[in-house]
Image (cartoon, rainbow, N blue to C red):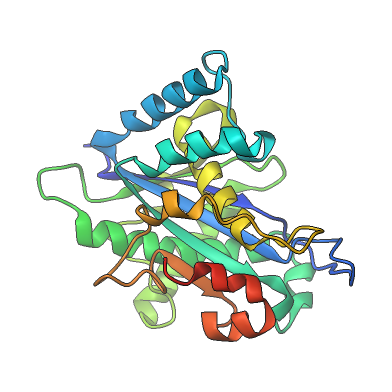
Amino acid sequence: MTTSFVAYIDESGDEGFVFNADGTGSSRWFVLSAAVIRQVNDAQMVSCLKEARAVLGKPPKTPLHFVGLKHDQRVPYIRRVGALSMRTVNVLVYKPLIAEPEKFQSTKYLLYRYVTRLLLERVSWLCRDQRRADEGDGFCEVIFSNRSNMSYGDMRDYLKLLLAQAEDDPQRVQIDATVINPDQIRSVEHSKLAGLQVADAVASGFHFALKVNRYGETETGYLPHLKKTIYRHRNMAMGYGLKVWPEDLATVKSKAPEALNLEGL
């Protein structure tokens, strides 16, 4: 039996901690996003990319990288992404507020793994609450955009450890083991799957809304198209389809005014 859902995962921003006063250096924000779709609707991802390429005048099967497009190309693309029958989960990390960055600097990919935990907790809640008895096995296949130097075997082992901890302390780790199976996690090159290119557009769209450019501006024009995709629980997006870390939104706003762009989503 096939899985009930597929979650495509990609990121925008970097994991560095070099923040120069002039705004250069590492990105202040790191965004990890999941585009979650029912397995029966997965073909919509392919249709979305096919239509976007046609509108943009791109040859068939050309991979789309959101940051590689001009603004006037991104708009029709993100509009089509926002119309998909999917939900998105987005973890938005304001790195300058991380209290002990040396912990994340000392172990490669530790920040990525921790943010993945926050993401998959929320993906599992979404799928648990939306699964149908007559549609798949209730689980969600998880597909990461491949990072060439990262071991996804290590990622699977990390998630197995988290699920074991969830059994002992459900309040500490809240990944639902009836939805996420570490053995159903894999990585694929960005160019190979339409769903990963959609996840790239989602993560980049949120990152553009938070990334302050050299002129002190952000680009919020993609958010109205993404708003309808955000996972909500009892009409609440914050804490569910949007997770700000390491502090809550109110605290982050006091240090990073660009976080105001998240209000009203």
Image point (55%, 43%), residue name: 200
Residue 23: x and y, percent? 84, 65
- Outermost residue on the left side: it is 134
Left or right, 129 with respect to 107, comes to: left
Residue 225: x and y, percent? 43, 48
Residue toward you, 167 or 64: 64
Name above or below for residue 149 compared with residue 160.
Answer: above
Image point (76%, 58%), residue name: 213
Name above or below for residue 244 compared with residue 11.
Answer: below
Residue 122: x and y, percent? 39, 65
Q: Residue 235 lies in what quarter of the image?
A: bottom left
Report the label total.
Answer: 0
Image point (34%, 40%), residue name: 84
Residue 184: x and y, percent? 40, 45
Left or right, 234 with respect to 65, comes to: left
Left or right, 244 with respect to 122, comes to: right
Q: Residue 246 lies in what quarter of the image?
A: bottom right
Q: Residue 121 lies in what quarter of the image?
A: bottom left
Image point (20%, 42%), residue name: 136
Residue 13 visible from this viewpoint = yes
Name above or below for residue 32 compared with residue 190.
Answer: below
Quadrant of the frame with the N terminus: top left
